[in-house]
Image (cartoon, helix red, strand yellow):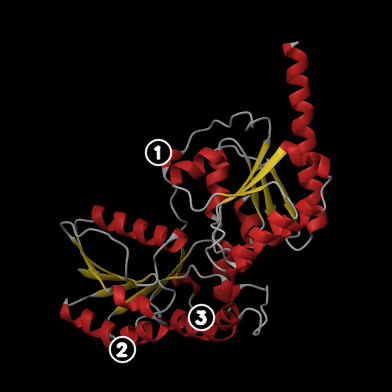
């Protein structure tokens, strides 16, 4: 069978991880031929897998629409495709072969609402893109989702819920160990938030909680953001707020997977994101026996249901997060003092 996998939006972070996972699975499937349609990712063609790149798609939304309407169906015909797997939440228009879609954009399914003036892109996803996604879901022959909560949301407008399949992302087992070291970084407790620079990632609740904390504790902890201050207006605003208020927050920029897992092993994960299809850092942190402070939302409640080392809070309530952070720092200082007393 000739299977074509479409994922032209994927370029970084979560979307790229999903693409790479499907690519690796395809390499192991010697019974079928795969054709990956991508934009910029530099995947390599190997044996039964052919990678076809269209980098010009990324120039603008107009280029993307043109590709979807006039190029995608021609590429499908050229390679005599039997089945399409779309990793971009939407079916490919103007084709007649069977289609499967992978839904990983949780914004259209979220109960958190965004203002048109302040957040036009997020508003578009919730009020326009949502209907395109629903149409695609109804037309698709099979639907992949990452979590039970997403499956429940999609079931509300799908007649045949048997075509919805839960496919959770894989974790790199080579990076997993069961150890979690004593958290010491120049005598400081580490909190860690691995995330991209989107507004719905909700870094602001951490800044506000930190701002209201007892300032005498600032010398005893650091919060790590994997953000580049110059990534966009949002990250620049976060950075300026942090600097102006002299908050103990470090902006590292993007880290490698190895570096991220190293932080899991020596820090407490903070994860206040308002919207997640899965929340991969939660699962990764659990694999390292990491303490987790997370937003109390469907995705986190599902993933952390049987995990004991967690604290859940209202992601819009900075005062509760402040109390949790202060308590963790106090416990850390108490343990540190007990260790010093034993050494003496």
Q: In the displayed structure, does residue 65 sit left or right of residue 255?
A: left
User: Which residue carries the number 3 mark?
Assistant: 159
User: Which residue carries the number 1 mark?
Assistant: 174
User: Which residue carries the number 2 mark?
Assistant: 94
Q: In front here: 258 or 167?
A: 258
Of all residues shown, which one is farthest toward the top?
344
Q: For residue 96, which quarter of the picture?
A: bottom left
Check disc 3 and report its element: helix, strand or loop: loop
Q: Which label's residue is closer to the chain start, 2 or 3?
A: 2
Does residue 274 show up? Answer: no
Q: x, y percentage for residue 230?
A: 54, 62
Does residue 234 show up? Answer: yes
Q: In front here: 95 or 185?
A: 185
Tell me, yes or no, whether the two marked residues, 2 and 3, touch with CB atoms within 8 Å: no
Please count the marks in the image: 3
In 3D space, how far apart are the residues under numbered discs 2 and 3 (Cα atoms)? 23 Å
Check disc 2 and report its element: helix, strand or loop: loop
Q: Mark 1 Cα within 10 Å, few/some/many (few <14, many 20+)? A: few
Q: x, y percentage for residue 319?
A: 83, 55
Which quadrant is home to the N terminus? bottom left
Q: Which label's residue is closer to the chain start, 1 or 3?
A: 3
Which residue is located at x 76 percent, y 59 percent?
314
């Amino acid at each position: 069978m000739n299977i074509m996998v479409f994922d032209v939006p994927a370029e970084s972070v979560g979307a790229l991880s999903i693409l790479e996972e499907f690519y690796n699975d395809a390499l192991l499937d010697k019974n079928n031929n795969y054709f990956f349609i991508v934009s910029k990712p530099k995947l390599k063609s190997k044996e039964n897998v052919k990678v076809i790149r269209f980098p010009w798609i990324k120039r603008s939304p107009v280029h993307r629409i043109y590709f979807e309407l006039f190029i995608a169906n021609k590429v499908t015909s050229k390679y005599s495709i039997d089945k399409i797997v779309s990793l971009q939440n939407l079916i490919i228009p103007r084709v007649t072969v069977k289609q499967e879609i992978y839904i990983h954009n949780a914004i259209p399914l979220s109960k958190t609402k965004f203002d048109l003036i302040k957040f036009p892109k997020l508003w578009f996803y919730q009020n326009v893109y949502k209907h395109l996604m629903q149409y695609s879901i109804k037309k698709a022959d099979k639907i992949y989702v990452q979590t039970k909560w997403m499956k429940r949301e999609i079931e509300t407008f799908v007649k045949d819920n048997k075509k919805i399949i839960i496919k959770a992302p894989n974790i790199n087992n080579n990076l997993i160990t069961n150890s979690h070291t004593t958290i010491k970084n120049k005598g400081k407790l580490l909190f860690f938030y691995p995330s991209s620079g989107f507004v719905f990632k909700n870094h602001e609740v951490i800044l506000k909680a930190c701002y209201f904390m007892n300032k005498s504790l600032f010398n005893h902890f650091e919060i790590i953001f994997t953000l580049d201050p110059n990534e966009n207006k949002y990250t620049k605003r976060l950075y300026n707020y942090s600097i102006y208020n002299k908050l103990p927050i470090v902006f590292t920029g993007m880290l490698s997977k190895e570096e991220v897992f190293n932080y899991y092993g020596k820090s407490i994960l903070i994860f206040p994101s308002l919207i997640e299809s899965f929340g991969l850092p939660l699962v990764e942190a659990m694999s390292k026996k990491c303490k987790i402070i997370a937003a109390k939302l469907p995705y986190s409640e599902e993933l952390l249901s049987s995990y004991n080392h967690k604290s859940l809070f209202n992601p819009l309530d900075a005062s509760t997060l402040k109390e949790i952070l202060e308590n963790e720092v106090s416990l850390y200082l108490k343990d540190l003092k007990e260790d010093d007393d034993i050494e003496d």
